[in-house]
Image (cartoon, rainbow, N blue to C red):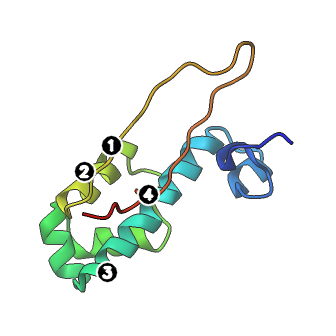
Amino acid sequence: MTRIPAAKDPTRNVWLQLGLPDAEEHYLKAELVLRLDKAIKTSGLTQRVAAQRVGTTQPELSKILRGKFSEVSLERLMRFLTALGYHIEIKIGAAESKKAGNVIVRDARRRAA
């Protein structure tokens, strides 16, 4: 059974379904925004306090969390998450011969101390 990465899976990536260019980038941004929203809620922060911590305004943060993030860079979303104390790891490795690579976003597993 072949596993299709979510960013390339038309059943999970609405931007791919719509045939938009950069569909995988939009999917990745959406994943980071979902994690940003979860980070803010888990920390019990208001949008105003969270915006101050990440270096933006509350109205801009609200706009991003409501899905208006097409103009926001992946780098900026990652900076927001790291400002809230989250660790982001990017791994680069060779794909199988003659196959396209993929991008995967997943939550880190907590390890027992």
**Cα distance in 3D space between marks 4 and 3:** 15 Å
Q: Residue at x 62, y 21 (%)?
A: 95
The amino acid pointed to by label 3 is Thr
- Which mark lies nearer to you, 2 or 3? 3
Callout 4: helix, strand or loop? helix
Q: Is residue 25 left or right of residue 74?
A: right
**Cα distance in 3D space between marks 4 and 1:** 10 Å
What percent of the width, then of the height, locates residue 57? 20, 69
Q: Is residue 90 above or below residue 48?
A: above
Callout 1: helix, strand or loop? helix
Residue 75 - label: 1
- The residue that label 2 is drawn on is 79
**Cα distance in 3D space between marks 1 and 2:** 6 Å
Q: Is residue 74 above or below residue 107?
A: above
Task: Categorize mark 3 by other alpha carbons within 10 Å: few (<14), some (14-19), many (20+).
Answer: few
- The residue that label 4 is drawn on is 32
The amino acid pointed to by label 2 is Arg
Task: Categorize mark 4 by other alpha carbons within 10 Å: few (<14), some (14-19), many (20+).
Answer: some
Depth order, front residue of 61/105: 105
Q: Residue at x 27, y 52 (%)?
A: 87
| Mark toward the start of the polypeptide (1 vs 3) | 3
Residue most extreme to the top: 97
Depth order, front residue of 112/40: 112
- Which mark lies nearer to you, 1 or 3? 3
What percent of the width, then of the height, locates residue 40? 29, 76
Quadrant housing the C terminus: bottom left
What percent of the width, then of the height, locates residue 68? 47, 64
- The residue that label 3 is drawn on is 42
Residue 50 - label: none
- Residue contact at pointers 2 and 4, CB within 8 angstroms: no
Depth order, front residue of 91/51: 91
